[in-house]
């Protein structure tokens, strides 16, 4: 009888070890199943687009690197002021992005796309502008971050 208890205890411990081993394998596999870089980049861009449409300047800036540079010597603080000004000036903001051309270069990427930005009262846009955008991104521990952008009115306006 004592031997049977010992065998059951050993069997239970063996099952627990197998289950723990399987859980460890699942954790490792889950870590390996990270989304592909381009997919994560496109998701970051979509998240930033949604933040603008929700008039959430802070959430938009989460995707912008500390060392951001833009046209005319613009830095991150200047971009943040532009985004805040648009949020304050418009009760609604619409951003429609055209197809994005993504070029991955290791931990960096260049993304080119067109954008139609609208703003105005809550129901109808009062103004709209189309842009051609070239952006540079860097992947890191905190995900993709925008570190450079240049935009020009579409059609040379």
Image (tube, helix red, strand yellow):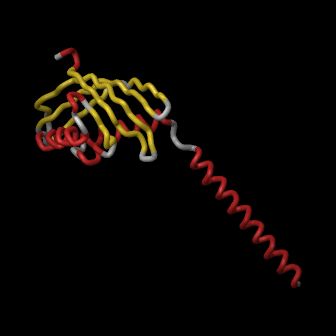
Vertically, is 120 above or below 12? above
Left or right, residue 8 beside residue 60: right
Left or right, residue 94 beside residue 145: left
Q: Looking at the image, which is closer to me, 152 or 22?
A: 152
Vertically, is 68 above or below 71? below
Q: Position of residue 105 (x, y in %)?
A: 47, 28
Q: Looking at the image, which is closer to me, 140 or 37?
A: 140
Residue drawn where x is 30% and y is 41% of the image: 50
Q: Is residue 64 visible?
A: no
Q: Is residue 134 visible?
A: yes
Q: Looking at the image, which is closer to me, 13 or 74?
A: 74
Residue drawn where x is 60% and y is 54% of the image: 27
Q: Position of residue 8 (x, y in %)?
A: 81, 75
Residue drawn where x is 42% and y is 26% of the image: 102
Vertically, is 43 above or below 151? below
The image shows a total of numbered marks equal to: 0
**Which corner quadrant holds the N terminus?**
bottom right
Q: Position of residue 51 (x, y in %)?
A: 28, 43
**Which corner quadrant holds the C terminus?**
top left
Q: Quadrant of residue 70?
A: top left
Q: Residue furthest top?
A: 155
Q: Quadrant of residue 12?
A: bottom right
Q: Quadrant of residue 112?
A: top left
Q: Position of residue 20 (x, y in %)?
A: 68, 62
């Amino acid at each position: 009888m004592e031997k049977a208890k010992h065998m059951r205890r050993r069997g239970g411990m063996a099952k627990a070890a197998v289950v723990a081993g399987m859980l460890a394998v699942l954790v490792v596999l889950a870590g390996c199943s990270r989304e592909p870089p381009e997919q994560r980049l496109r998701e970051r861009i979509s998240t930033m687009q949604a933040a603008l449409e929700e008039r959430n300047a802070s959430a938009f800036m989460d995707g912008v690197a500390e060392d951001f540079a833009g046209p005319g010597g613009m830095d991150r603080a200047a971009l943040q002021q532009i985004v805040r000004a648009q949020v304050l000036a418009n009760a609604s903001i619409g951003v429609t992005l055209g197809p994005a051309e993504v070029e991955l270069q290791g931990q960096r990427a260049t993304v080119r796309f067109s954008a139609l930005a609208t703003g105005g009262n809550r129901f109808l846009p009062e103004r709209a502008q189309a842009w051609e955008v070239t952006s540079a991104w860097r992947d890191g521990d905190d995900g993709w971050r925008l570190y450079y952008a240049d935009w020009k009115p579409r059609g040379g306006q």
